[in-house]
Image (cartoon, rainbow, N blue to C red):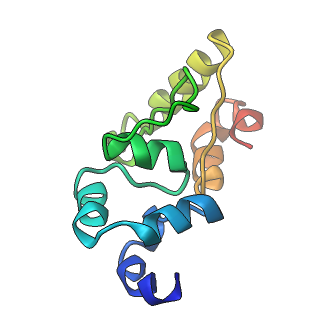
Amino acid sequence: MGKEAERFSSHLDKIPNNWTSLYRLAKLKVEDFRGLIEGGKLHAATTTNEINEALGKRSAKAKKGFKAVVDIGAVGEESRQAFAEELVRLVREYHSNLTVPGHAEDLEKLLKASGEAKMAA
């Protein structure tokens, strides 16, 4: 896997932090890896099942549920706090989960003024 480290170096913010996903990415053909990057399919919490699905190789073991990645940074700065508050409200209302790999502090800052900071952890 070490010989494939160079392909990861310019995309470290998108590389998952679990060994099974790292191993799967290291075993990919270069064009498949590039396709994941260019297609926006790779992020810090990407699972092996998500990698396989993005490549059209859905595992029989894949869960029926799915994850959605939301880029709060893409929301206009004047609307981010309201967007984050609404996201937290929806997570609570629908008894879902919210994970913020590498950005928990950023979300906590957005929510701090509204008293929602406990949800960001």
User: In the image, is residue 121 above or below residue 101?
Assistant: above
Task: Say if residue 22 shows up in the picture.
Answer: yes
State the residue at coordinates (37%, 66%).
Answer: 28
Viewer-proximal residue among 76 and 42: 42
Viewer-proximal residue among 8 and 13: 8
Work out which quarter of the rendered image holds the C terminus and state it.
top right
User: In the image, is residue 92 above or below residue 37?
Assistant: above
Q: Is residue 3 left or right of residue 112?
A: left
Viewer-proximal residue among 81 and 22: 22
- Residue 77, horizontal then vertical, whole percent: 36, 44
- Residue 44, horizontal then vertical, whole percent: 52, 57
State the residue at coordinates (47%, 28%).
Answer: 82
- Residue 26, horizontal then vertical, whole percent: 45, 72
**Quadrant in which residue 79 is drawn:** top left
State the residue at coordinates (42%, 46%).
Answer: 52
User: In the image, is residue 21 above or below residue 3?
Assistant: above
- Residue 47, horizontal then vertical, whole percent: 54, 48
Viewer-proximal residue among 86 and 95: 95
Residue lying farthest top? Answer: 93
State the residue at coordinates (25%, 65%).
Answer: 34
Residue lying farthest front? Answer: 60
**Quadrant in which residue 18 is drawn:** bottom right
Q: How many marks?
A: 0
Task: Say if residue 71 shows up in the picture.
Answer: no
